[in-house]
Amino acid sequence: MKKSMNSNQCEPSNGQNEEPLSPTLSSEERKTLHSSYVQAGIKWIGMLHGISSDVVEMKNGLLVVTVTLPESYSQPVEDGVFIRILKHCRAWHRLQMEHRLRRLYLIVYTDKGRAGFMVRADDMDNEEFVQRARETREFGKTRKLLFDRIYEWEEVMGM
């Protein structure tokens, strides 16, 4: 019987003789994972809190994820939220990420403006709407590193 994958293997654990899974995502796989991650909840965090997050790349089992917070964000950063959303998106399972990932590198930035916003149409005048749209357009162009951290496979899977 074939063992389940641990942090040093990239083999399917279904017991079949298949090609080992690549610890590197292709460009198309990265786009699929990122899109699924956004749909799984990141878009709501962006609209409600002005935060953005991206799946940047995965090479040799190291998955790079960035998070950009607006400078005005005053709540403590719960980085595990982003990892849990990622782990629960559809593409995570479809791409068998639990068998390909070795470590996750989370990079958190701050920036002026906001990634997005959500308002009722009658709650905002046109000038305020235009100002928020400008902030959204400029978001990400002046970001500053807040912190970064590498999570080992066991930490990611335990979240």
Image (cartoon, grey):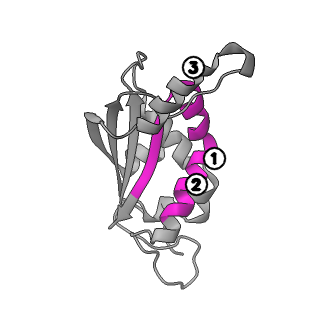
Q: Amino acid at mark 3?
A: Glu
- Which residue is at a point 38% across and 62% down the rendered structure image? 58
**Residue corresponding to mark 1:** 39
**Residue corresponding to mark 2:** 35
Q: Amino acid at mark 1?
A: Gln
- Which residue is at a point 53% across and 70% down the rendered structure image? 13
Q: Measure the C-alpha gap from mark 2 to mark 3.
A: 32 Å
- Which residue is at a point 66% across and 22% down the rendered structure image? 119
Q: Is residue 47 magenta?
A: yes
**Which segment did they paint magenta?**
30-56
Whichever of labels 3 and 1 marks the residue nearer the N terminus, that label is: 1
Q: Position of residue 123 (x, y in %)?
A: 69, 14
Crowd tier of the residue under label 2, counting other residues whose Cα lies within 10 Å: few below 14, some 14–19, many 20 or above: some
Q: Secondary structure at mark 1?
A: helix
- Contact flag, marks 2 and 1 (Cβ < 8 Å): yes
Tell me, for residue 56, which label it has, or none: none
Count the numbered circles shown: 3
